[in-house]
Image (tube, coloured by chain):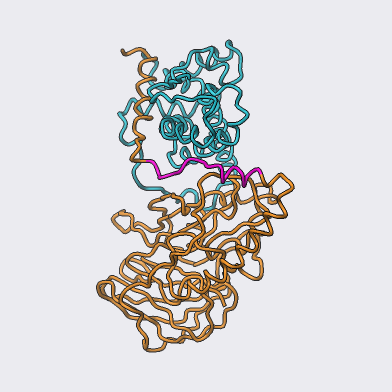
Chain colours: A orange, B cyan
Amino acid sequence: MNTIDDRIAAALHARADAVTEADLAPAAPPSSRVVLLDRARTRWAVPLLAAAIVGILAVATVTAVQLSRTSSHPAGPATQLPVQPTPSAVAPTPAPTPTAAPSSQPPSQAPSSRPPSRPTVSVTPPSRVPSGPADAFTLGYQPLWPFGSYADAEQWRTKAGGSQPWHLDASQTALTFTRSYLGFTEINLVTGTFFDDLGAHIKVGYRDPNGQPHTAATLHLVQFGTASDSPWEVVGSDDTTLSLEQPAYGSRVSSPMAIGGHITGVDENIVVSVLASQTDRSTVARVPAGGDHAAWTTGPVTFAQRGVLTLVASTGGHLQQVERFAIHGVHT
Amino acid sequence: MRTMVRNKDVPVRLTPADDADSAVVALFASHRLTMIRLAVLLVDDLETGEDVVQDAFAALHRRWPALADREAAISYLRSCVLNGSRSVLRRRRTVRRNPHPDADRLTVEGADGQLLLAEEHRAVIAALHRLPRRQREVIVLRYWSELTEAQIAAELGISLGTVKSNAFHGRQAIAAALGGAE
């Protein structure tokens, strides 16, 4: 039993048997619908299919925008949402230079004590069956970073020649977004990863002085395209003890607006920022808050940013400047 | 009607009349876990293994009408998993050649199947993943999939002699990692 052959076989079986049905993410077998769509890409029906998709997307976009005005960051992919009107650079630029322009005003309008219901209208959840690149792609979420549009993502995938390959790694994309785009340089750790049909859920955080890891936020990323090497895109955060719910995820906003959500914590000071890019950003409010799932709001705040906006709420001050944060995508 | 049995799997009965959907659904139910385990041995990562296997089933579904021999379905699936795993490993090498600035600080915490393994098993798995790709595939197909050398040769599209050579060198390397004792 102790020959090297037996030892190798035993080790391989032990490693393989460590994977059980319970460990597997739910997945459906491929269906004819997916295969037919895949074949259609190479046949004469492409123009008809594209026209049909455009029509469906147009109707779905209107529906989604209307629904999103009363909903939070959806748990599942809804329909196509606007992307940044000005394509960003294919690759993110270096460190941000935040400009503080606070105009905090007293809270005047608290969001409801219960989170708004999530939208039930959705296109069929994306199959985990990858296929080749399509002429058009519906992300299903508000793309925030690093790509402003599907065209940008495809440009990187097809022409960048493998530069900045961290775009293929959801964890590294999440960490770079946090540190470079948001400017939270104290967040330097990925504390957990989870992948499902909705994309990647990456926990980013830090270690306390005792070496214990803490999660500051769980970022939600999706692949911007259907190819296996499509890059990852940050689309929001999975909020728990600090949430951003107002205005609704993906909604159209204008200045002034009230930003709010819920928080569980003691003696917190929520810093609220609006980002249109790494350099076009401002801190719009600082809100004292605390309690158990307590509502917080900035009241009406003004902002000058335009286009796709990333709203950021962060708290800290106990162990480091930023210990928890949440992000939200809206557009003007 | 023929019966195909793969390893420790539940037998799947297929007939020429089986359409792609029902046949692939049956194979998916009975072989997904086995294929994911194979992929995990090759890429050492559950999430990636799941993706590789999902790709493999999608390819099988597309290929189903053209499969002359339905008994080859399992072999085709296994080949897709092997190919998909190679692509993943190739992509990883590209990423490692261009490390992210924060790569050294990037730490992934969480449950890891390897933590549950005995020390010797961990050493074997670590040695397995240091092997060249071809040797690793031969070792996994021989010691876990329990294929014969002829079957491995057919699966990988290499000669019997190459299989024997890779198995020998892979086995030697793992033995050396374990201290050379047999």
How many labels were placed on the picture? 0
The residue furthest front is: B17
Left or right for A174, reference A25: right
Q: Residue at x 41, y 54 (%)?
A: A189
Q: Residue at x 59, y 59 (%)?
A: A138
Segment tinted magenta in the rendering = A24-39
Q: Residue at x 34, y 77 (%)?
A: A269
Q: Is residue B120 above or below residue A125?
A: above
Q: Position of residue B155 (x, y in %)?
A: 56, 20
Query: From where the camera sits, is residue A284 visible?
Result: yes
Quadrant that contains the N terminus of chain A: top left
Quadrant that contains the C terminus of chain A: bottom right
Q: Nearer the viewer, residue B13 or A233?
A: B13
Q: Is residue A283 above or below residue B67?
A: below
Left or right for B7, reference A264: right
Query: From where the camera sits, is residue A93 visible?
Result: no
Q: Position of residue A209 (x, y in %)?
A: 31, 58
Asked where in the image residue A316 lies, by quadrant, the reply is bottom left
Q: Residue at x 56, y 59 (%)?
A: A139
Q: Position of residue A10 (x, y in %)?
A: 35, 21
Q: Position of residue A144 (x, y in %)?
A: 54, 65
Q: Is residue B125 above or below residue A277?
A: above
| Residue B167 part of the magenta segment | no
| Residue A27 part of the magenta segment | yes
Q: Nearer the viewer, residue A114 or B27?
A: B27
